[in-house]
Each structure stands twice: as structure tokens, then as C-alpha cells.
Amino acid sequence: MVDPNSDYNVERKLEIQFAERPGFEGVEDSFRSPVVYVGMGYDPQCNFAKYPPFDPKLVQGISVLLDTGADEMMVDEDLLDSVGAPFVAETSTIKTMHGVEEIKRRKMLLVIKELGIAEECEVVPMKISDGTRAYSAIFGMKFIGLGRLILDMQGDSFFILRLSNVARHL
């Protein structure tokens, strides 16, 4: 649900940070991951007839890698377990370094407070948080395709999201 006080067709800018990988903090030539910070959770009593439609205590902040080489929205399966995100009937076919896997999707609530967004969406559960990454979710082209991604390592980096795209596609 988009905040009823917002202009539905407006574009909103979400700032991108370049996070250092754990164990490489302060290393000059270490790669940094382009991440955004969002809220994720699951509220079985979610009611989109009101705003906000969820209990804020059931949402936790996570860092998300924006990955143009990925198709899906993937969230660490341990995080999904911790918030009680249910499985849905649909599956996704995912190519991993171990081959092709058929994975049951899960439902979660995506919250981007800065943009006034609270949307229920389906994600692919994956093992992501292993202590070597600066993020616990990966949003691929399913999410990136809803807006414009601007990455500038020397200047401002941001993601511009059209709110009307969110309600139609997540």
C-alpha cells in the first residue's frame, strides 16, 4: 500500500550507500556493495485498508544489495524464518553455483519508510547472511525494473522509484 498522503505517480529517490564487506572495513582497495536500507517482516494481521497496515514491531531493518545480474528478490531464509514469513504455492527456478534449483517462494512485507511504501510481496528464500556479506537480501531486476538505478562511485548514487510501479508489480 502506498501512503495515502503521497502523490501516487510521483518519483521518489532512495539513497544508495556503498557498504564495506565484513572483515574488509577500512581496506582502501576493497570492493564495496551498493545497498539500500529497507524494512522487512510479516504481519498475519496486515490490513491494507489502514495506514500503516502493519504492526511496526514486526518489521526489522535490513540492508539490500541492488544487483543488476539477478532477476529475483531474494531474502536470507533465516530472516524470513525469524519473522514467520509463510511459504506460497509458487516456486522460482534459480540458477546457483550448484546448478538449477526449484525454490518455494515466501510472502513478506516490504517497508521503505522514507518513500511511504508498505507492500506485501513474494521473495525467494536463500542462504545469504554468512558473515562475509554486507547485506542480507538481494533485489534483482524485478525490483530495479520499477525505477532507475544511478551508481556513481565518486558522487551521489540513488534509486528512483515510481510509486505507481510498486503497487502494480511487487
Image (spheres, helix red, strand yellow):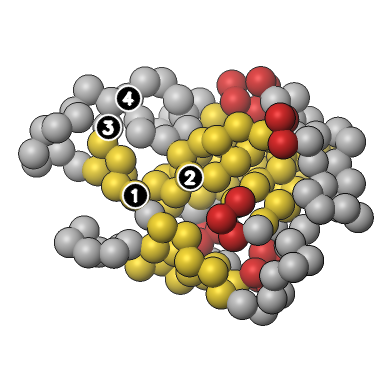
Q: Please state which amino acid type lies under the numbered disc 2.
A: Tyr
In contact (CB < 8 Å): disc 4 and disc 3: yes
Q: Which residue is mark 4?
A: 132
The span from disc 1 to disc 4 (Cα, nearest Å) is 17 Å
Residue of label 2: 37
Which label's residue is closer to the chain start, 4 or 2? Answer: 2
How many marks the image carries: the answer is 4
Question: Of marks 3 and 2, which one's residue comes earlier in the chain?
Answer: 3
**Residue 7 x %, y %:** 69, 76
User: Farthest residue toward the front?
Assistant: 5
Q: Write the residue at 71% across / 30% down.
A: 57
- Measure the alpha-carbon separation of dots 3 and 2: 15 Å
Q: Which residue is mark 1?
A: 17
CA distance separating discs 4 and 3: 6 Å
Q: Position of residue 127 (x, y in %)?
A: 51, 26
Question: Which amino acid, mark 3?
Answer: Arg
Q: Amino acid at mark 4?
A: Thr
Residue denoted by label 3: 21
> In the rendered structure, which amino acid carries the disc numbered 1?
Gln
Residue drawn at x 48%, y 45% as measured from the top left: 37
Q: Earlier in the sequence, mark 1 or mark 4?
A: 1
